[in-house]
Structures are given as C-alpha cells and as structure tokens.
C-alpha cells in the first residue's frame, strides 16, 4: 500500500507539471509534457517559416503547442504538416483543436487510418502487464478511435515525410499496426515514436525521476510483441546517432548504441511482460 501511495503522489506531481521545451538540435525542439513528448521540426534561422509538428500530445495541450510554435516562428505561424507516429490518445489528444486552428494537413500510416477516421477503435489497454502505477491505471486511458475526416491523409508510399526534406518514415509496427518512426539519413537522427522508450513508461516514479534507460514500447498498449521486437531491430540496424522518443529523454552516441543492442539481444526479458492479454 505504501508504494501505491508513493506512486499516486508522484502521479499527481506529474500531471500538475507544465510543458517544458528542450533544444535538441538546431532544427528540433522537443515539447515535453508530463507523460509524452512531441517535436517541432524546422530551423527558425532558415527564415522560411517552415516547420512540422510530430505528435499532437494529450488533451488540453493545444495552447501550449501553439505558443511554443509562435515563440519559435512568429505569431500566426502554421506547420507545413502534422505527422502522427500513431493514433493513441496521448499522441492525438490536441489534434482536433489544432486542426480547427490551423489549415495544416495531417499524415499517418495507412494502417492507422481506421483509428483516425472513426471506423475502428484500438484494443483497450492492459493494466496487468506491470506493477507500475501508469500501467495499473491504464484501463482508464481512452482507446476509442477519432474521426479527422478529410483532414487526415496516408503518408506517401515513397517513404517521404511531407514538409520534412531529407527525412523518411519507417514502418515500425507492434505498438500499433501502423506505427512509424522518422529517420534522417544525413545525420542519422531518429524520431522514435513509441517503438521504444528511454524511460520505464509503466512507472510514474521512473517518469518523474527522468530515469534514462532504454525499454521496449509502452507495455499496456502494445498488441503485437513479435512485430515490436522486429521493429526495434530495424531501428538498431540504422545505427542512429541520436534517438528522440515519445517517452523519455533523447539518447545518443555510444550509450544509445550499446543500450539498443542490449534491447535487441534481450528483448524478451526487457520488453515483453511476463503476462498480459496481448503477450501471446
């Protein structure tokens, strides 16, 4: 009971934290919400005003996202595109408000379209996968699909990322059917999405402490562990110089290389829960 009380208090601290930002590279600004990250990709020094939003955060974060964008690119700025790595609630929470403010097109993988056009719901979260409080309360997380209508489009078949010259999308399923990660070959920059994390996402205590260690995708929503393991291997083989996850802090260099290799080699032990409705 004591551990539950401690984690409940930590969760309250987390949810009360305001958004913060981190300048990751000259052209990538990380938007850090209490439980998820989003990215603004675009160089304000290029003086072309062009940028892209990757991820749309949780509900009620639209104002923070817009203020961060306007602080970087000026009042009234709009992204060339909004890219969704997938459609879980913590990645599309502000999307409806954003598309009512901006005229920007929204893109996701074609296999995510049913969940983003109101045709299908995601499988519900599984709270039995871990003892951490985030996992335990995951049964309350929204899993219903949303309907963006004509505002959502499938990503181009040629793997290009609209508005992000030099980047390509990589299909990394497992956490969701159409999950994608984004990769820039010129400097081997990787925007991971939820293909893997650098924090134990199931634990409120680990999130608040900003513990930095590579784990698999969030266990409570991952539905295909074989595909998830293959996706991690695909990303490891890219030899990324830096990884920017949706959950946790960016990681780079030898630390990233060694921990990714460890995750691939020990995926069953590190990532896959010992029990759960989607384990088998």
Image (tube, rainbow, N blue to C red):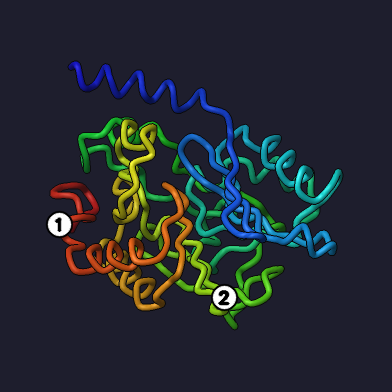
Q: Residue at x 51, y 62 (%)?
A: 191
Q: Is residue 141 left or right of residue 156?
A: left
The foreground one among 202 and 278 is 202
The foreground one among 31 and 57 is 31
Q: Residue at x 60, y 59 (%)?
A: 25
Furthest-front residue in this view: 254
The foreground one among 99 and 258 is 258
Figure quadrant of residue 79:
bottom right
Total marks in image: 2
Within 10 Å of the Cα at label 1, are there few (<14), some (14-19), or many (20+) other Cα atoms? few
Q: Is residue 120 above or below residue 188?
A: above
SS class, disc 1: helix
- Mark 1 or mark 2: whose residue is earlier in sequence: 2
Q: Is residue 80 left or right of residue 189?
A: right
Q: Is residue 30 above or below residue 159?
A: above
Quarter of the image with the N terminus in it: top left
Task: Specify the label residue 269 is tagged with.
Answer: 1
Q: Is residue 195 left or right of residue 150?
A: left
In x, y percent, where is residue 262?
Answer: 22, 64
Q: Residue at x 66, y 60 (%)?
A: 26
Task: Specify the label residue 168 is tagged with.
Answer: 2
Furthest-bottom residue in this view: 158
In x, y percent, where is residue 175?
Answer: 37, 58
Quarter of the image with the C terminus in it: bottom left
SS class, disc 2: strand
């Amino acid at each position: 009971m004591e551990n539950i009380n401690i984690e409940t208090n930590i969760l309250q601290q987390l949810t009360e934290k305001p958004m913060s930002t981190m300048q990751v590279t000259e052209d990538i600004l990380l938007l850090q919400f209490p439980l998820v990250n989003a990215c603004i990709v675009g160089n304000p020094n290029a003086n072309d005003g062009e940028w892209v939003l990757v991820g749309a955060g949780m509900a009620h974060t639209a104002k923070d996202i817009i203020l961060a964008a306007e602080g970087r690119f000026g009042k009234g700025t709009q992204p060339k595109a909004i890219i969704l790595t997938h459609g879980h609630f913590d990645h599309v929470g502000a999307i409806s408000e954003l598309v009512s403010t901006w005229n920007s097109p929204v893109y996701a993988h074609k296999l995510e379209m049913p969940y983003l056009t109101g045709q299908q719901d995601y499988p519900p979260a599984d709270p039995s996968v871990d003892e951490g409080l985030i996992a335990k309360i995951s049964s309350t997380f929204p899993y219903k699909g949303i309907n963006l209508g004509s505002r959502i489009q499938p990503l181009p078949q040629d793997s290009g990322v609209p508005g992000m010259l030099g980047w390509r999308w990589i299909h990394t399923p497992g956490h969701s059917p159409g999950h994608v990660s984004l990769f820039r070959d010129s400097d081997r920059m990787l925007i991971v999405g939820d293909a893997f994390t650098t924090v134990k996402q199931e634990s409120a205590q680990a999130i608040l402490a900003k513990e930095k260690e590579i784990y698999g995708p969030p266990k409570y929503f991952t539905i295909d562990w074989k595909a998830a393991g293959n996706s991690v291997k695909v990303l490891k083989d890219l030899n990324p110089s830096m990884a920017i996850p949706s959950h946790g802090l960016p990681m780079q260099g030898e630390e990233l290389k060694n921990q990714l290799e460890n995750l691939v080699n020990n995926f069953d032990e590190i990532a896959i829960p010992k029990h759960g409705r989607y384990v088998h």
